[in-house]
Amino acid sequence: MLILQRRFLILIFISITFTAFSKQKSNITFNIDTVFSIAQMHYRAQNELYPLADRYPRTISKNGNIVTTKLNDWTEGFFPGSLWYIYENNKQKELEKIALKWTVPMEKIQYITSHHDVGFLMYCSYGNAYRLTQNPQYKDILFQSAKSLATRFDTITKCIKSWDYRESWDGKHKWYYPVIIDNMMNLELLYFAAEVTGEKRLAEIATKHALTTAKNHFRKDFSSYHVVNYHPKTGEVLFRGTCQGFADNSTWARGQAWAIYGFTMTYRFTKRKEFLTLAKNLSNYWLKNSNMPADGIPYWDFNAGTKNYTPAEWAIKRPAPAIQPRDASAAAVTCSAFLELYEITKSKKYLHEAEKMLNSLASDAYLAKPGTNGNFLLKHSVGSLPHGAEIDVPLIYADYYFLEALHRYKNLIRR
């Protein structure tokens, strides 16, 4: 009996110690469930505006009206994806129905081959739907979506074409085979489809794209280019620069975020050390950047308004702002990536930076009160300042990656 009592006491001590350790390792200053409740209020209000789910919320206009998109832009998957994360947090059946209401109409997108964003569109929506429901029909839709995305891969360039032919925004360059850093995010759809169907070719395409991107998209300091244009017949790099950043030699904050997230995710599927090494180096650029504000929410471009970085033609018609706007979307993407990178490496620097960003995004400075901000969750993001589009406004993908980061963090502190 005495031995059993001692064992019981030891178990209690271990339990208390583990609980204390779990509490100590969390440095957030807010209640995660409260933020999810606020998100639920925002998204219920959004849902009620569109009974048919035929227009997908994206941002707000200058006068505060909600801006929506039809299917086959690039952001539609983030609204249902956000709903799935909110549902996952409380498992209310009504929220599952709302998430399905916004997911099901996207089924037709699985056949689109005209751009690379089918990954964003379908993995954020149907990917989360399949993860939470295990509906085999959703797996089939995701498989077809991956096959559609794979048609944009070319064996000469060894990467997936992001856009069809277009000119650079300043009209100086013709892009016949443009690849943008955002494209790394779409590889998750390919890897997932390969895993659940055994179609290895899809994973091979994803890895080849990642290797090509690793070779051509980064500078010596591991800052990223937004756009790389390839010669479609030789695979030669013809141009490195930007479309949404401050200058061709600057580092667009969300582009760096896509890169950190993309190579962390690619390592998860491949376990190739060069991808993890690159993810770390890309993260170090973020962590050590001298132009990072104290709250961890970056300016829209790390080099905007600084010496040796001159904005191109867009600044003639639209002068660069004296005070550079922040980009909460870039922070949300990187925050989510850092939480995964922490789980992989166990390096506390990623966890601490993620916690700082979470605290900032969940503060009154960035988190919108219900009934405000067009009923989007986060304030202060930037779509494309050079194009004069979506400057210092909410953006649906900022919400999505913030909710994903909250979900990841919540699971982390439960372990």
Image (spheres, rainbow, N blue to C red):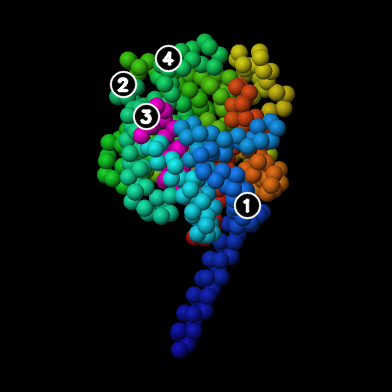
Instruction: Name which residue type carries label 4.
Output: Leu
Secondary structure of residue under mark 1: helix
Where does residue 299 sit, x and y in percent of width and height?
A: 64, 31
Single out the residue that lies furthest toward the right.
322
* Magenta residue span: 111-128
Vertical side of 152 occupied by 336: above or below? below
Q: Residues within 10 Å of mark 4 (few under 14, many from 20)?
A: some
Q: Sequence-wise, which precedes: disc 3 or disc 2?
A: 3
**In the picture, residue 350 is in which quadrant?**
top right
292 with respect to 217 (left or right): right
Numbered badge on residue 298: none
Identify residue for label 1.
41
Amino acid carrying label 1: it is: Met
How much space separates mark 4 and mark 3, taking CA atoms? 24 Å
Circle 3 crowding by C-alpha within 10 Å: few under 14, some 14–19, many from 20: some
Q: Please indicate, yes or no, whether residue 35 appears anywhere in the rendered image.
A: no
- Determine the CA span between mark 2 and mark 4: 14 Å
